Amino acid sequence: MHEIRKILVGVDGSANSIRAAEMAADLAKRYSAETRLIFVIGGSDYTMLEGKEVWMEKASHIGENELKKAEDIMIAAGVKYTKDIDFGHPVKKLLENAKESDMVVLGAHGKGAVKGIFMGSISLRVSQECPVPIVIVP
């Protein structure tokens, strides 16, 4: 049986990612695992016209705000967690971080502009290349 000690949770502040955090908290509690909350800021996610340092500072602040709800879920569940804000392409960063995890939990749709009956492009691409089991939460 696959041992689950570390669960990676992609967080973007969307309703689906909050439900993913809830699922991850339940799994972490069940398996006495630790969760790692990650918010990835892509270059096209936010329109910021200032210089790189100002952009990174503002983006980090946005990431902290988006992670807060997921952190509250982990605290309420009483599970260990860490959090991280990373910069780059979300699929690439999630796959890189998945290598250090036993499971990945993502929302089916993020904050992208296109929402419908199909799975979001990030969760779909991560599921196709993920080196560990993945749970996609609607």
Image (tube, rainbow, N blue to C red):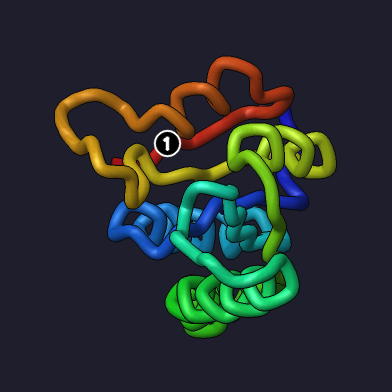
The residue at the point 71 percent across, 58 percent down is: 86
Q: In this view, does 26 lie above or below 77?
A: above
Label 1 environment density (alpha carbons within 10 Å; few <14, some 14–19, many ≥20)? many
Please state the horizontal and vertical placement of residue 58, each as a whole percent of the image: 58, 77
Quadrant of the drawing holding the C terminus: top left
Depth check, front residue: 47 or 72: 47
Residue at the farthest right position: 100
Depth check, front residue: 51 or 34: 51
Residue at the farthest left position: 116
The residue at the point 35 percent across, 32 percent down is: 120
Q: Is residue 117 above or below residue 110?
A: above
Is residue 43 shown left or right of residue 44? Answer: right
Q: Is residue 119 above or below residue 29?
A: above
Q: Dot 1 corresponds to which residue?
A: 136
The residue at the point 52 percent across, 63 percent down is: 25
Is residue 98 shown left or right of residue 100? Answer: left
Dot 1 lies on which element? strand
Please state the horizontal and vertical placement of residue 104, each as a whole percent of the image: 61, 41
The kind of residue tagged 1 is Ile
Please state the horizontal and vertical placement of residue 106, each as a whole percent of the image: 48, 44
Q: How many tags in the picture?
A: 1
Quadrant of the drawing holding the N terminus: top right
Is residue 68 shown left or right of residue 89? Answer: left
The residue at the point 74 percent across, 51 percent down is: 6
